[in-house]
Structure formats: C-alpha cells, structure tokens
Amino acid sequence: MTLSSFESVRICMGELDEYYEDFYGYGSRALIVTGKSSAKNGALGDVLRILKKLEIDCIVYNNVTQNPPIESVSECATIGLDFKADFIIAIGGGSAIDVAKAASVLITCENPNDTTILFCDGLDEFIPVIAVPTTAGTGSESTGSAILTSHEQKTKVSIKRRVYCKKAFINVNYTIGLPDEVTLSTAIDVLSHYIDGYMSTNANLETDALAENGFREFSKLLQNIAKRDFDLNFRKKIMMMSNCAGHVISVTRTTLPHILGYPLTYQKRVLHGFSCGLLTYKFLEFHKDTKKKTRLLDLCGFTENGDFGLFMKSVCPNPNCTEVDIQRYTDTVWADRSRLHTHPFDVEREDILNIYRESLLI
Ligand code: NAP
Ligand code: ZN
C-alpha cells in the first residue's frame, strides 16, 4: 500500500499579479494553451500583462475544445515547437490543462504528430507547465493525468505519461461567469473524485482522510446546489475542494464512475461531471465495502443511498439512453477492461451492463 505519494505542485491563491515573479525561471518563450472563454473572464489578459512585464515572448494556441481529441495535442505541440517554446501556460478548465500537459510531452519529441508516445511507458520528459484554472472541478492542475478523446476507441483515454504542473495560480474570480450547468457539472466532478478515490483499490489512510473531509465540506454545499445558488463563498469552497480532490485521485486514480462515464460523454456529449454523477449511485450500490459506503453517505449528509440517488437525478440531466446505447458503452468499457483494476472486487461484463442499465434506463 502506498502511504504517501502526493506530488508537490506549488499552489498560489489570489490575484495573479501578486505572483508575477513566479512566472520567472522557465525560459523566455511561452506557449499559452487555452479555449475561447479565457479572453472574456480576464485570465488571458492577466497572463499576457504579466508576460509583457517580464519580457517573456509568447504565442497563443486558443483552439482547445471541450473533451479535446488526441489530434488537437499534435496541433498545439506543432505550434509550440515552431515557436521554440520553453514552457507552457495552460489557461482554462480541465480540457485546456490536459491538452497543455500532453503537448508538453510531444514538444520534447521530434515528431509532434506521433501521439503514440503519450500512451506508452517511458521517461517522463516534458517541458514545464503552469496552470491557471478557470473552472473548479477537475483538479487537473494537481493530478499527473491528461484525459483526451480517442475517436478510434470511441471513448476518453488517459495518457500514460505522468505530467505534473510546476505551479497553479488559483483565482476564484475567473469562475464567476461560468454557465450554471458547467458550475454544477464541475461541482459533481469534485464529489466524484472524492468518491472514486475513497472507494478505489488504491485508497490509503491519507487519501481517505482528505476524502472524508471533502464529504463533510460537500454536505455544507448541498443547499447551494439544490437552489443553484453559486455565490462567491460556494465558488471559493468548491475551488479548494477541487484542488484537494485532485490530490486524492492523483494517488488513487479514478474508478468505475469515471471509466463508465467516458463513453457516455463521448457518445451523448454529456458533461464530464454529470456522466460520473449519473453512474455513482448504482456504483455505490454495487460496491461491496458497506462500511465505507455508509460512512461516505453519512458524511455527505444522506441518510441512505436512495436519497443520494434522488439528489443525483435532480442535478444531472437525463441523457435519454436506449438499450442499444448501453450495450455499446459496455462493449467499449469491456474492450479495455484492464482499466477496471482500481475497483477492489471482480467486475464482470454483466455488472457493467447492469450499472449502466439501472443508472440510465430506469
Ligand atoms: P472544460 O471542458 O475545460 O470547459 C467546459 C466549458 O466551460 C468550455 O466550453 C469552456 O470554454 C467553458 N469555460 C471554462 N472556464 C470558463 C469560465 N471561467 N467562464 C466561462 N466559460 C468557461 O471543463 P472542465 O470540466 O473543467 O474539464 C473537463 C475535462 O477535464 C474533461 O475532458 C475531463 O475528462 C477532464 N478531466 C481531467 C482530469 C485530470 O486529472 N486531468 C480530471 C477530471 C476531468 P472554452 O473552451 O472556450 O474555454
Ligand atoms: Zn472527473
């Protein structure tokens, strides 16, 4: 059992300007990796101003989309290579941070179009990445993973290389203009990370302590979620919890709700957090560790799993799946069943089908 393996990512909270000197030390040419929203929420402007002050040249790649495909990493890395970037600044949600992390590996290779390197074991060589998160959910700024869409596998896949950001600059103000459905989905992603981590084969004393604290904190936010009342206090708390839950899954990895959620996101474009949330209730019913299940539900403020299921159904939109859909998702998951090792008990194909069926059809 691994007792401690948290990576140290320097987390800086507050206004970016307070930390401008922290952008020093990684080189004189930066590749900024982002989507379109960072130009509106202030994050891109803040970074550009700091780089100008420090006389660091930069180029902006702002083509990141939700659930980014593997191909977009090549596109991004090619721009970084041509520019001779020394380091990357990722600005955005999990999608931008994940593209940046994967591109940081490809930039060290001769051929940025050869993405196979991302999916094989080897030396973890990459150029430094700094993150400026603008959503509060994925915790990608503190995990070593990058999740990309594989059109070939018709699901989402994690790169094998572990890329940790050097630093993350967390300013809750960037999240104020998030659409409610993204705020909601990312909040459910935070809870899913705590739950996946707590119920994973790789859970340990430290991750359990963090997760249990996360469940207690989440119970205090239930009213905000029910009323869609996302005030600044809610946003601050969920941002901190997101980062902390990132530490948890960084050690434990995610388990069935995430693995089963990926084909749902791929096929039905369901937001990542909602995909996990929709599947978590039946996952807990299926899980054999009754002691942990009871404790987590109690800490989260639910008297039984049924209440938790009702809560999730009230929060996560119904993706309207059919029996044909869920057979297809089951095939996708089963084709790559080695990923299921983070579940501490045996999982059969029928079990996966049943979790999908009972979560999505009933
Ligand atoms: P996201 O896909 O990064 O962003 C969702 C949407 O919100 C996008 O349309 C984005 O627009 C917009 N947006 C982002 N910040 C905004 C802001 N401050 N104001 C207004 N709009 C904003 O969402 P996410 O939930 O943060 O990331 C999900 C991805 O992370 C998934 O691919 C998931 O698999 C992955 N993930 C990774 C890890 C990990 O450890 N690496 C963990 C969990 C999840 P723009 O694109 O235009 O900016
Ligand atoms: Zn997640």
Image (cartoon, grey):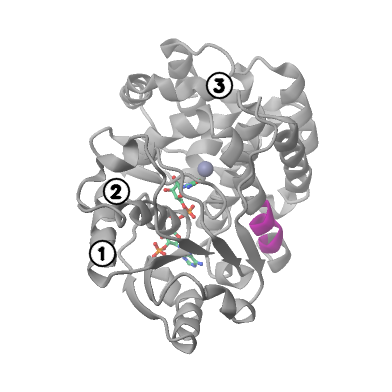
Q: Position of residue 287 (x, y in %)?
A: 62, 18
**In the structure shown, which secondary structural element does the residue marked by tag 2 occupy?**
loop
| Amino acid found under the numbered disc labelled 3 | His
What mark, if any, has residue 81 been given in the picture? 1
Q: Magenta segment, which residues?
A: 235-241
The answer to whether the residues at label 2 and label 1 have Cβ atoms under 8 Å apart is no
Q: Position of residue 336 (x, y in %)?
A: 36, 23
**In the structure shown, which secondary structural element does the residue marked by tag 1 occupy?**
helix
The answer to whether the residue bearing label 2 lies less than 8 angstroms from the nearest atom of ligand 1 is no
Quadrant assignment, res 57? bottom left
How crowded pointer 1 is (Cα within 10 Å; few <14, some 14-19, many 20+) is rated as: many
Label 3 vs 2, first from the N-terminus: 2
Q: In terms of depth relative to the viewer, which is nearer, 229 or 232? A: 232
Image height check: is 283 above or below 346? Answer: below
Quadrant assignment, res 234? bottom right
Tell me what residue is drawn at x 50 percent, y 83 percent.
50
Tell me what residue is drawn at x 20 percent, y 50 percent.
113
Label 1 vs 3, first from the N-terminus: 1
Q: Which residue is mark 2?
A: 69
